[in-house]
Image (cartoon, helix red, strand yellow):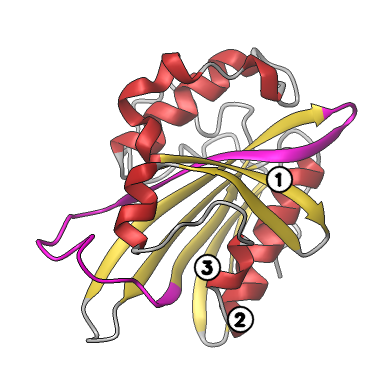
Amino acid sequence: MEHKTSNELYKYWDAVRNNRRAPHRFEIEPSKIANILSQTFILERRQHDIYRFRLAGTQICSNFGKELRGKNILDLWLGPDWTTVHALLDIVTEDAAVGVVRFRAMTQEDREAEFEMIFLPLIHTEPSINRVLGSISPIETPFWLGTVPLIRFEVLDARDIWANGLLSADTNSDPAFPDTSDAQDHRVVEVDQRRFRIYDGGLSGPSKIS
């Protein structure tokens, strides 16, 4: 993970999780992440292909140029990007993995900005994981961001990471990538001629992205 918001949110989630499969929704205290709250969101898994924004931070909505609350996050993506994000969210909610996505967003005028997005599983109704805590943060903030709507989105990198130490809050490795020294295996897959790094092993078994 490159962005400090992603790292801070992960560290908070991991502390609340306390070595369990996932924390409960009611255990998340907004006051504990007040400084990054505007860049966070919560998704509700309504159906297999509906992950609705229940909450979307003000900075996210401002950056996107639209209100996201109540909308399906998968509606932002098309074709193979939809498939990639959908598969990653399924891994997060079914296997309690952590998901990280780097994507490019574009305006009608073809201006571009890159973002990092993280997915963190939450339990709302036992025993299902049907909520996802996350954040969306720009890698860099161009002067125009927030003044014109973002209308197209392209996945650049998608990863699932198991929370058994591969993404430790205490890791001394390069913050842009997880420490994979304990991973059982990793592979690179191709979707529509784009390559995605997938890390396997950990809490619940192998990754399903293919």
**Mark number displayed over residue 181:** none
Earlier-in-chain disc, 1 versus 2:
1
Q: Which class describes the residues within 10 Å of circle 2: few (<14), some (14-19), or many (20+)?
A: some
Q: Secondary structure at mark 2?
A: helix
**Mark number displayed over residue 44:** 1
Label 3 or label 1, whichever lies nearer to me, is 1
- Residue receiving disc 2: 80
Earlier-in-chain disc, 3 versus 1:
1
Looking at the picture, tell me which residue is in the foreground, 191 or 141.
141
Quadrant housing the C terminus: bottom right
Residue at image location 46% in from the left, 23% down from the top: 11
Label 1 or label 2, whichever lies nearer to me, is 1
Q: Is residue 51 left or right of residue 109?
A: right
Residue 110 image offset from top left, x and y in percent? 24, 85
Q: Is residue 190 visible in the rendered structure shown here?
A: no
Residue 17 location, quadrant: top right
Q: Is residue 142 left or right of residue 170?
A: left
What segment is highlighted magenta in the picture? 125-154
Q: Secondary structure at mark 3?
A: strand
Label 3 or label 2, whichever lies nearer to me, is 2
- The amino acid marked with disc number 1 is Glu
Residue 89 image offset from top left, x and y in percent? 68, 54
Residue at image location 68% in from the left, 64% down from the top: 86
Residue 66 image offset from top left, x and y in percent? 40, 62
Earlier-in-chain disc, 3 versus 2:
2
Q: Is residue 165 above or below residue 118?
A: above
Q: Secondary structure at mark 1?
A: strand
- Residue receiving disc 3: 196
